[in-house]
C-alpha cells in the first residue's frame, strides 16, 4: 500500500490509467529534461544534445506528458506554484521540441543521405527513437537507389529471414 | 516506389535503334511498332531496344542529349542556378543507367557521360536537401518544386513526408482539446 504524499516512479501507461482530473489520485512531476533549465540548452544549439541518453523517446514522451493537467491542490501552494511553472514550461518546451526537431532535421537528413560521407554512428547515438526511425528511412531511400544503380535490384537473393534458419543440407538428412 | 519501378516506367520512353533484321509492323497493346528493316533507324521503347540489343539484333543510337558537350552545359547550368533546371528527359538517370549498361559500345565517351550525369544528379539532390531544410525551418505549409524527376522525388520523398508527419504531430500537440490521446477507465 502507498502512503499519501509519497513519491514513486511508475511507468507512463500506469500513470495515464491512474490519472483522473476529478479525483486527483496522483500528480505527475516533470522529468528534468522538459524543464526550464534544459530549454536554454536547446535553444542555444539543439544539435549538441544527446537525446538518446536523455530518455530515448524525447518527442513521444513529451507529447504524452501534455495529457496530465496541472495539479491544483490549494493546500501545498508553494509546491504548486513551482509545479505550475514547470507545467507551463512543458508547454513551452513542447513548442521547443518542434523547434528542436527542426534544428536537428538538417543533420539527420544529410547524414542519412550520406551527403558528407562521414561516419554517422556518432550522430545516430545522440538521436532519440523518433529521429532514429527517420534516419533509417532516409538511409533506406539512399541504399535502395545505390543498389539499383549498381544493378543489384534485379538480382535474386535469399531473404535475410531465411538465411538464419540453418536448414540441414540434403546430404546430411540422407546419411 | 522502388527504384526498379521507376525504371520500369522509364522503359516506356522511346529511343532510336538500327535493326539488322526484317519484321512487319507488330501490334502491341500499347500501340504499333515497326516495321523493321535492316539498316533503317526506327523508334522503339527502351525495353524493346534493350531486349533486341541483348540478342544482338540492333545497334542503339544515343539520344541527342547523351553527349559530353550537352551534358557539361546542363551540369554547369545546374550548379549555377538555385532552382532546378529542366532535364532533357524526365528519366535522365534511368536512361543513362540502362543505355550505358547494355549499349556502352554504341555510346561515345560513355565513362565521361556517366560521370557528368552523376555530378548533375548529386547537385540536384543537394539542392533538394537545401530546399527541404529551408521548408522545414520556416515551417511553410506549401512548397512548389519544378522540374524534379520521379527518381529524385522517390529517393528523398519518404524521408521528407515522414519528417513532415512528425512535425505536424508535434505542432498539433499544443492545440487545446487534444484529449484524444487519453483513455477513460
Image: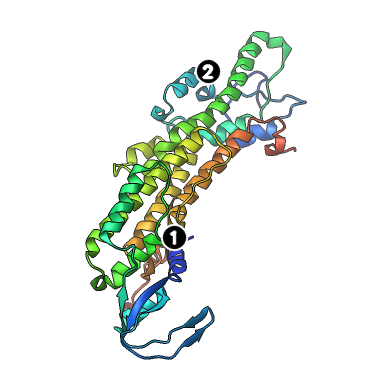
Which residue is painted at 49% across and 17% down in the image? A37
User: Are discs 2 and 1 located on one and the same chain?
Assistant: no
Q: Residue furthest right?
A: A22
Which residue is painted at 68% across and 9% down in the image? A77
Q: Secondary structure at mark 1?
A: loop
Please give left or right for residue A41 compared with residue A172 in the image.
right
Rendered location of residue B156, percent (x, y): 44, 50
Label 1 crowd (10 A; few <14 / some 14-19 / many >=20): some
Rendered location of residue B166, percent (x, y): 55, 40
In the image, A38 versus B38, the foreground residue is B38
Vertically, is A40 above or below A143? Answer: above
The C terminus of chain A - image quarter: bottom left
Q: Chain of mark 2?
A: A
Vertically, is A170 above or below B99? Answer: below
Marks 2 & 1, CB-CB < 8 Å contact: no
Q: Mark number for residue A10?
A: none
In the image, B132 versus B176, the foreground residue is B132
Rendered location of residue B4, percent (x, y): 43, 65
Place residue B185 in its image quadrant: top right
Which residue is painted at 38% across and 57% down in the image? A145
Rendered location of residue B25, percent (x, y): 46, 88
Q: Residue furthest top?
A: A78
Place residue A87 in its image quadrant: top right
Please give left or right for residue A110 compared with residue B168 in the image.
left
Q: Chain of mark 1?
A: B
Look at mark 2 in the image and give the residue it sits on: A36
Please give left or right for residue A27 compared with residue B23 in the image.
right
The N terminus of chain A - image quarter: top right
The answer, for residue B143, to whether it is visible in the render is: yes
Look at mark 1 in the image and give the residue it sits on: B90
Which residue is painted at 26% across and 57% down in the image? B69
Vertically, is B96 above or below A25? Answer: below
Amino acid at each position: 500500500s502507498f502512503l499519501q504524499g509519497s513519491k514513486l516512479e511508475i511507468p507512463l501507461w500506469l500513470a495515464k490509467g491512474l490519472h483522473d482530473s476529478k479525483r486527483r489520485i496522483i500528480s505527475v512531476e516533470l522529468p528534468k529534461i522538459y524543464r526550464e533549465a534544459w530549454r536554454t540548452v536547446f535553444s542555444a544549439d539543439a544539435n549538441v544534445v544527446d537525446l538518446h541518453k536523455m530518455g530515448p523517446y524525447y518527442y513521444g514522451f513529451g507529447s504524452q506528458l501534455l495529457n496530465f493537467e496541472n495539479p491544483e491542490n490549494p493546500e501545498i501552494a508553494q509546491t504548486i506554484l513551482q509545479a505550475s511553472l514547470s507545467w507551463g514550461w512543458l508547454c513551452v518546451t513542447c513548442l521547443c521540441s518542434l523547434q528542436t526537431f527542426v534544428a536537428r532535421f538538417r543533420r539527420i537528413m544529410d547524414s542519412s543521405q550520406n551527403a558528407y560521407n562521414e561516419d554517422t554512428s556518432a550522430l545516430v547515438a545522440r538521436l532519440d527513437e523518433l529521429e532514429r526511425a527517420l534516419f533509417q528511412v532516409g538511409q533506406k531511400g539512399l541504399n535502395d537507389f545505390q543498389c539499383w544503380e549498381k544493378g543489384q535490384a534485379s538480382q535474386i537473393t535469399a531473404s535475410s529471414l531465411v538465411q538464419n534458419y540453418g536448414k540441414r543440407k540434403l546430404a546430411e538428412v540422407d546419411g | 516506389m522502388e527504384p526498379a519501378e521507376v525504371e520500369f516506367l522509364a522503359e516506356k520512353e522511346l529511343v532510336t535503334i538500327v535493326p539488322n533484321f526484317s519484321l512487319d509492323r507488330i501490334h502491341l497493346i500499347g500501340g504499333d511498332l515497326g516495321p523493321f528493316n535492316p539498316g533503317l533507324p526506327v523508334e522503339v521503347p527502351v525495353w524493346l531496344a534493350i531486349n533486341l540489343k541483348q540478342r544482338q539484333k540492333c545497334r542503339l543510337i544515343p539520344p541527342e542529349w547523351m553527349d559530353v558537350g550537352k551534358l557539361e552545359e546542363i551540369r554547369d547550368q545546374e550548379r549555377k542556378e538555385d532552382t532546378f533546371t529542366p532535364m532533357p528527359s524526365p528519366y535522365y538517370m534511368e536512361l543513362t543507367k540502362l543505355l550505358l549498361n547494355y549499349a556502352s559500345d554504341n555510346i561515345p565517351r560513355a565513362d565521361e557521360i556517366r560521370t557528368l550525369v552523376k555530378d548533375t544528379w548529386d547537385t540536384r539532390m543537394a539542392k533538394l536537401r537545401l530546399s527541404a531544410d529551408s521548408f522545414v525551418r520556416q515551417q511553410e505549409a506549401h512548397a512548389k518544386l519544378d522540374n524534379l524527376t520521379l527518381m529524385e522525388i522517390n529517393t528523398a520523398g519518404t524521408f521528407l513526408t515522414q519528417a513532415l508527419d512528425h512535425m505536424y504531430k508535434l505542432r498539433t500537440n499544443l492545440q487545446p482539446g487534444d484529449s484524444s490521446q487519453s483513455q477513460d477507465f
